[in-house]
């Protein structure tokens, strides 16, 4: 392995993580922001549950049963405090970022900056599972590309006990395995997928279920907590999509963008299905798995997310599960390398307006401003920039907006305002 090739993207991501916190401290001391990051407010929201699992394991009657154990176990073994585990997460993410740049053979530091400033990526810098999931997810794609199936099986077990997103990967791997083989071999592809991906996923899930049963005496404790505490049960989605805790003005637009990405991935997979049916070689396995993950995540959010007394489904968590994952970055990279005509950009933006309507963007002028306008601006700037790489001012516009949103969302997280 080339030492410098590893060092550059690793240090780039590591430096960004350090800069992120440095800016937080600077902006608070400059009285631009009001909340100083500290050990107490960094343990907000889900981090409280991970810390509880780290200290006490799973306990009957405790809501922490709705979370997976690998990150709390790593935290416990490392014996780090809150700031220490944040530093560990930054290192884990930087390592995954290095693997991602090598997987995609991306050497353009402008693209690195576009990835790192995505607003939802601040989740990798808090005591959450995102950084570990990011590293394991990229490692999975890397092992798949190198056809190292024993390593891939081990990584599948690990990612399955990291967070629920690991389970969402299994259908994505099935889609990939079937799509990359001739149509007449679909049955053999299915059996091979069951052995290569289904079996390791089942082992990981069984391990998780058995550990929870050993500590709580309750079978399938995770699923019971998710359904009774957070109301994640199977139900038909309702319109318009919304969020809780005044999320409409703070992060609804970001969840709308995440669901648009999942919908775009679904359309792209339909095109790949047609190619498969016509015996045309499909796209590369990493992009097939990545789009498969986005689609399965989007469908899961649509059909299992709660309604919490409102008329529409709460699309909470979309930006976490989709945008902050490595699979979104692979998806973004794949479509960023294509030149687009003005008519294509205009057509996609027109379709996006129909999509924003599902999220209540036309219920009033204020809703339009905080839901449709940010999405339209980012889509247009991104498409124009990737089509005309010499447009440095577009890159500056995207990075400045994304970084500002990233810093503000983090401030709201530690306020604490609900950000998931």
Image: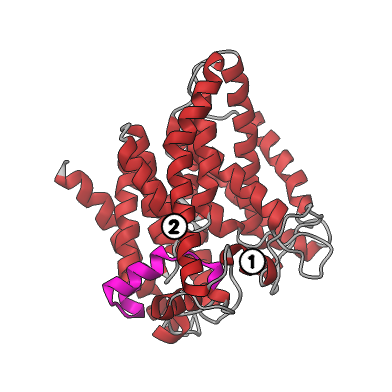
Q: Is residue 76 above or below residue 372?
A: below
Give the color scheme: rainbow, by chain, secondary structure or one colour.
Answer: secondary structure
Q: Within 10 Å of the Cα at label 2, are there few (<14), some (14-19), or many (20+) other Cα atoms?
A: some
Look at the image and say whether residue 291 sits in the magenta stretch: no
Q: Is residue 341 above or below residue 355?
A: above
In this picture, residue 162 sits left or right of residue 372? left
In this picture, residue 320 sits left or right of residue 155? right
Please report the bounds of the magenta region as a residue range.
Answer: 65-86
Q: Do tag 2 and tag 1 residues touch (Cβ < 8 Å)?
A: no
Q: Quadrant of the C terminus?
A: bottom right
Residue 105, position as x, y percentages in the image: 32, 36
- Relative depth, front residue between 298 and 346: 298
Residue 69, position as x, y percentages in the image: 43, 66
Q: Residue at x 57, y 69 (%)?
A: 218
Give the secondary structure at mark 2: helix
In this picture, residue 219 sits left or right of residue 147? right
Please name the residue that numbered disc 2 is placed on.
Answer: 207
Tell me, yes or no, if residue 110 can be seen here: no
In this picture, residue 149 sits left or right of residue 214? left
Task: Report, in whole angstroms, how far the alpha carbon at label 2 lies from the one at label 1.
Answer: 17 Å
Mark drawn on residue 224: 1
């Amino acid at each position: 392995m080339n030492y410098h090739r590893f060092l550059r993207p690793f240090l780039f991501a590591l430096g960004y993580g350090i800069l992120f916190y440095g800016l937080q401290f600077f902006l608070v001391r400059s009285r631009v922001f009001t909340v100083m990051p500290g050990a107490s407010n960094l343990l907000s929201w889900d981090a409280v549950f991970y810390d509880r699992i780290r200290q006490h394991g799973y306990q009957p009657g405790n809501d922490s049963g709705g979370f997976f154990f690998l990150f709390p176990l790593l935290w416990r073994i490392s014996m780090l405090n809150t700031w220490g585990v944040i530093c560990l997460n930054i290192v884990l993410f930087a390592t995954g970022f290095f693997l991602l740049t090598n997987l995609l053979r991306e050497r353009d530091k402008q693209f690195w900056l576009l990835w790192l400033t995505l607003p939802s990526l601040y989740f990798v810098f808090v005591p959450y599972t995102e950084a570990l999931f990011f590293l394991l997810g990229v490692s999975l794609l890397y092992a798949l590309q190198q056809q190292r199936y024993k390593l891939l099986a081990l990584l599948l077990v690990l990612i399955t006990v990291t967070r629920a997103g690991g389970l969402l990967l299994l259908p994505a791997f099935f889609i990939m395995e079937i799509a990359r083989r001739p149509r007449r071999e679909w049955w053999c592809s299915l059996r091979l997928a069951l052995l290569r991906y289904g079996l390791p996923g089942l082992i990981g899930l069984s391990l998780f279920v058995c550990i929870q049963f050993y500590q709580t005496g309750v079978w399938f404790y995770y699923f019971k907590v998710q359904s009774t505490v957070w109301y994640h049960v199977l139900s038909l989605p309702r319109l318009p999509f919304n969020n809780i805790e005044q999320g409409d003005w703070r992060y609804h637009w970001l969840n709308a963008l995440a669901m648009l990405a999942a919908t775009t991935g679904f359309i792209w997979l339909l095109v790949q299905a047609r190619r498969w049916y016509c015996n045309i070689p499909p796209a590369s396995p990493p992009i097939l798995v990545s789009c498969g993950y986005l689609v399965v995540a989007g469908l899961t959010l649509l059909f299992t997310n709660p309604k919490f007394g409102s008329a529409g489904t709460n699309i909470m968590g979309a930006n976490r599960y989709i945008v902050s994952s490595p699979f979104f970055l692979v998806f973004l990279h794949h479509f960023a390398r294509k030149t687009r005509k003005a008519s294509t950009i205009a057509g996609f933006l027109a379709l996006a307006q129909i999509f924003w309507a599902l999220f209540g963007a036309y219920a009033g002028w204020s809703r339009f401003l905080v839901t449709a306008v940010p999405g339209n601006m980012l889509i247009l700037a991104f498409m124009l920039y990737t089509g005309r790489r010499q447009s440095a001012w577009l890159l500056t516009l995207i990075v400045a907006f994304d970084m500002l949103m990233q810093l503000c969302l983090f401030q709201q997280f530690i306020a604490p305002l609900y950000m998931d």
